[in-house]
Image (cartoon, coloured by chain):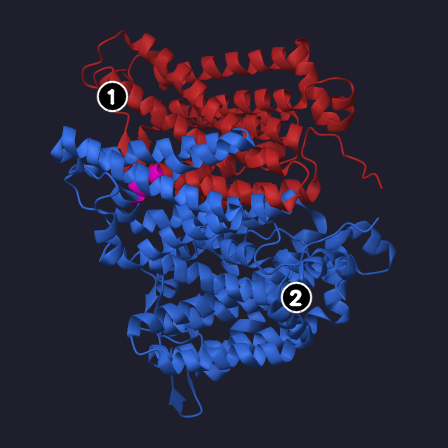
Amino acid sequence: MPIGVDEWVAQHGDRHDAGTGWRRAAARLDRRVGWWPRLALALLVGLIFGQLASNVNVETVAVNSLIYAILALGLNIAVGWTGLLDLGYVAFFGFGAYGYAIFSSHALGTGGVGGAPLPSIESIPIVLVAAGTFGAAIGMMSLRVSGDYLAIVTLFVGQAFVEFVNNVDPGTLGGVNGLYGLNPIHGFGGQIITPIGYYYFALIVCAVLMGLLHMLDNSRTGRAWKAVREDELAAEAMTIPTGAVKVMAISFGAVVGALAGTIFAAQQDNVFPTNFTANILILIYACLVLGGAGSIAGAVLGGIVVTAGEQMVSSPTDAGYLFYGLIVLALVLKVRPWRMLGAVIAATIALGVVLHAIVGAISSSAVAGSPGSGGWIGSLVSHWVIVPSKAVGYGNVLYILMICMVFALIHVRERYRLALLVPTIYVAACCWESRLIVNPSITAQILIGAILIATMAARPQGLLGSMRVEVV
Amino acid sequence: MHEFIQTLINGLTTGFLYALIALGYSMVYGVLKLLNFAHGDLYMVGAYIGYFVIQWFGGPQAVSIPVPLLVVIMFLLAGTGAGALGVLIERFAYRPLRTAPRIAPLITALGVSFILENSVLLLFGGFTRSYSTPSFISFSTGIHIGSVDIDSVQITIFVVSIVMMYGLMVLVHRTTLGKSMRAVASDREAAEMLGIDVNRTIAYTFFIGSAMAGVAGVMSGLAFNQISNTIGFLAGLQAFTAAVVGGIGSIPGAMIGGLFIGICESFASSYISSEYTDLIVFGILIVTLLIRPTGLFARPALQKV
């Protein structure tokens, strides 16, 4: 049983709400199936997905999802289990990628190994051991500095890594141009070159890693990590060697991060300093936080959901599904009872249709623009949202208005909230269609920031994390 | 020798900027025990507000009002704008998490910083904008001692920063608001029990700290001419180092730490290499934390069980 979680108390609400009939049976089945069968099931789903995926784009996104899932798994060791806010994690990712790149290209030139690339079966273990040592060195800092200071020192480590590969020895590390033309992962006479090959490779690595981490989670070390997270002083009083435990957590995380880096470099065929900036760090954090820090399944789910979501935003057709789907989902979860939900949706649709008709009657150029969404959603909303022919300035104003309305929504009393919800959704939709969807990369970044804030405010334990109950 | 003094003067210019940002960091850390990662982005927002003030009054080539008045308006608007934004961020992002585990507001702060940076990118574009300071403030006016130049922008920065820091010292040590800020910083619960309006005090602290960051943003625009949506991250990091070197939570510490980091950076870039300045600042941070984990000016805190 995880330390610090009184499971019986935590599940009290669930037992109460269990209900009858099929929901109860499902809940009982859910309790009976153990962890290992679930992992096998997830792996099976992954393998079937690989068989069904026929499009190279889908396969590339799937590989990226798995890489971020592995990254989130590694970050989870330090952040989720040990409670150390490691903001230099992206340096380990970069370390693995650059390590693989150096050994798999002619980067070492005349020195080193004579310029010949090493087979992956040798280079990956070398990189992982080196990453573990690097991680331990960074982890040593956690012996002297703790809490927020550790966060800022590690943030600097991440920054320093980018500066380092940018400036030091451009002959070997490539400087701003990065390293390219890397050998794919090869060994035992074969090599992996297709995206689907990397998908299966990453899937198996991810599954094996999940198994190992699960065993680690339930081991003596895993318990020690969680003891340090809950109360370092008490853990020390219980004779847990807190220093060694913390160094180990960061070092293990570094190994996992570097492993993700090697797959990333091999699959992408090149590495650049800009692949390892603070933006990527925040993306990894979003994966872990959304999925649920402290949970293996949560980290993997977060990695897949965030990467797939980011991909969906950049396609005009899928972005519509994502945006309107999330709004409807949030309404269904938050607005009770059902007739209020129906009233809110009906009022929003009516408001849009009426406003569109009025504005269209006054000036036809004010509704001349076409919504950014493609597909059937785009044609459906084209008579609902107001998109003028010059949408950029209008969209910017709406963006600020939308943020102000969200603030107002949080601020007003409960009974006015539903009334304000209707115009807020409408403004958000207009802003989305006229401005946000036009710049998918920026929108994705803003959404990632919003995920971090919203998860922390609404459900700090994430999607799959366990609710923590104070045991008095 | 004159090169040495010139480097020192340039270092002081950046140093005062860092000190102003570091003060906000330090004050917020004092009352909330929160690393406000979004603080550097408020500095960036301040720089943008200053830029739009210049555009509003006819652009750098044809300023329609006297230049000193323009600079004053820039400082005032950037200060109030960034300050108000800081208060909003505190109210809507950090206040709901007062009682949450320590890690939750930190991650929220990362998210806020990310949203601010990208919102500015969305609204104003990603290209670097220029204040074009030389077209309305002549760099040649100022003080010249031998071959050492202190131009008028640098003089403005020195004077405004010193006045603001002095004002802050008076505020913290002589007024009721300052007293309640110190009380909240030393023990929030006890302060609340003594009838201090904690929420209001924290809001004021955010306003003052963010306003100083906003003013620093305008100064950076005037002095270095170039602003973009990413300047906040690095400046925030350097300023945080300044706050830590001085001892976080200590106001004189933040000032001296800021000046120290600024001067170190200036010397490093003119005598060693400009590419490694960040690594050198990082080195200073590590050494400070290893030798004196609580900084140069803060008293070591006892951990109570």
* Depicted A469 relative to depicted B10: above or below: below
Secondary structure beneath disc 1? helix
Q: Which residue is mark 2?
A: A20
- Towards the viewer: A438 or B290: A438
Q: Residues within 10 Å of mark 2 (few under 14, many from 20)?
A: few
Q: How far, Cα to Cα, is label 2 from label 1?
A: 67 Å
Residue A344 at least partly seen: yes
- Image chain in blue: A
Q: Name the residue: 37% across, 27% down.
A: B47
x, y percent for residue B170: 62, 10
x, y percent for residue A282: 48, 51
Marks 2, 1: nearer the viewer: 2
Q: Quick check: A73 left or right of A447?
A: right
- Image chain in red: B
Q: Quadrant of the N terminus of chain A?
A: bottom right
Q: Quick check: A315 left or right of B76?
A: left
x, y percent for residue A335: 51, 45
Identify the amino acid type marked 2: Thr
Q: Quick check: A100 left or right of A397?
A: right
> Total marks drawn?
2
Q: Which residue is mark 1?
A: B55
User: Residue B304's mark?
Assistant: none
- Towards the viewer: A54 or A156: A54
Residue range of the region highlighted in magenta in the rendering? A426-432
Please identify the dominant SS of the magenta region: helix
Q: Chain of mark 2?
A: A
Secondary structure beneath disc 2? loop
x, y percent for residue A209: 58, 75
* Depicted A222 relative to depicted B239: above or below: below
* Depicted A275 relative to depicted B162: above or below: below
Give the farthest residue toward the bottom.
Answer: A189
Identify the amino acid type marked 1: Gln
